[in-house]
Every structure is written in structure tokens, then in C-alpha cells.
Image: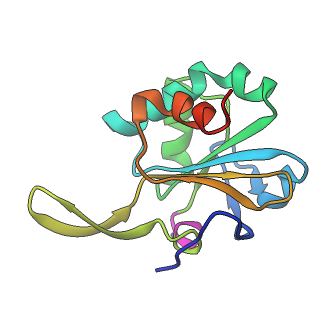
Amino acid sequence: MIQLKEGMKAPGFEGIDQNGKVIKLSDFAGKKVILYFYSKDNTPGCTAEACNIRDNWDLFLNKGFAVVGVSPDNEKSHKGFAGKYSLPFPLIADTSKKILNDYGVWGEKKMYGRSFLGVIRTTFILDEKGIIDKIITKVDTSGHTKQILDLYNL
């Protein structure tokens, strides 16, 4: 598994969002990007995280951040999830798990005593030049905005 670290150049990515639009890292040149990886649409933790970001969307925009979510769900699932919760940011459908693997967030997880492969919930904050500025591995789903803003004393 790839081990990305703060200060490294973020891997480029390209994927289709919930609206069928191609989203690339290069689209965000000159902007700070909150790139968050989550397991599955419409699950309690992932919904809490997405809604927490949605509820603070204007704050992120005012602070100069763009937001992109990525999960292995398909475009149709993302469209339903984004519509149900009025999510204003792109959700990339990474069904091939290429982006997940490039960022090292697809790996072994343990739950209820069994091991399986899945998304390791992680958020990468990229600077305006595409460099990884911060990595959050212990995501507080209902307080994720505060976690991010606290890193920058905002």
C-alpha cells in the first residue's frame, strides 16, 4: 500500500462525479482542496461526514477550499446520495478503486472480529500547488469541519 505523507505531491486523479462530469485534480490548480475518502453512500458515518461538510460549505468556500468526496460507489449511487442530502460538492465514483489505491486508502479493515478490504476513511488537504498539506486519518465524522479548521487555526 502506498504511504503518502505531508509535503509530498498529491497523485493526480480523474473520475466521474454524480452529475456525469469529469473531475480532475488539475481542475483545482490554485485552490486548496479537501479530498475526503469514505466507504459508502447512505451509511450513518459517511452521511454524518458529508452533511457536516455540507453544513459548513459556505465557510469552506470563504476560506478558499474546494471539496471533493471519493468512494467506490457508482455514479447512480452518488447521484441519489447527493440529491437526498443536498450535497453541493462533487462525489467521484471510483468503482475501479484506482484513486483509492493511488492514495493508499484501500486496504484491510477489521470489524466485529473479521478482516476485509475496504476504504480507510481519510482526508487529504492539498495546497494550491497540489502538495499534501495535511492528512487526517482519525476522522470525526460529525465534527469533521472543526477538525479541518483547527488544523489551520481558523
Seen as rendered, the residue at the extreme left is: 113
Q: Position of residue 60 (x, y in %)?
A: 71, 28
Residue 154: image quadrant is: top right
As drawn, 60 above or below 11 = above
User: Does the magenta run of residues contain 112?
Assistant: no
Q: Is residue 140 left or right of residue 154?
A: left
Q: Position of residue 43 (x, y in %)?
A: 33, 38
Q: Position of residue 120 (x, y in %)?
A: 40, 59
Seen as rendered, the residue at the extreme front is: 153
Q: Which residues are magenta?
A: 95-100
Residue 119: image quadrant is: bottom left
Q: Is residue 112 left or right of residue 99?
A: left
Identified at 43% across, 43% down, the residue is 139
Between 110 and 83, the one lying in front of the other is 110
As drawn, 140 above or below 135 = above
Q: Give the number of marks.
A: 0
Identified at 68% across, 60% down, the residue is 15
Q: Position of residue 81 (x, y in %)?
A: 49, 34
Between 20 and 90, the one lying in front of the other is 90
User: Does the magenta run of residues contain 99?
Assistant: yes
Q: Is residue 50 left or right of residue 29?
A: left
Q: How is the image coloured?
A: rainbow
Seen as rendered, the residue at the extreme bottom is: 1
Identified at 41% across, 39% down, the residue is 46
Between 32 and 46, the one lying in front of the other is 32
Q: Is residue 105 left or right of residue 43?
A: right
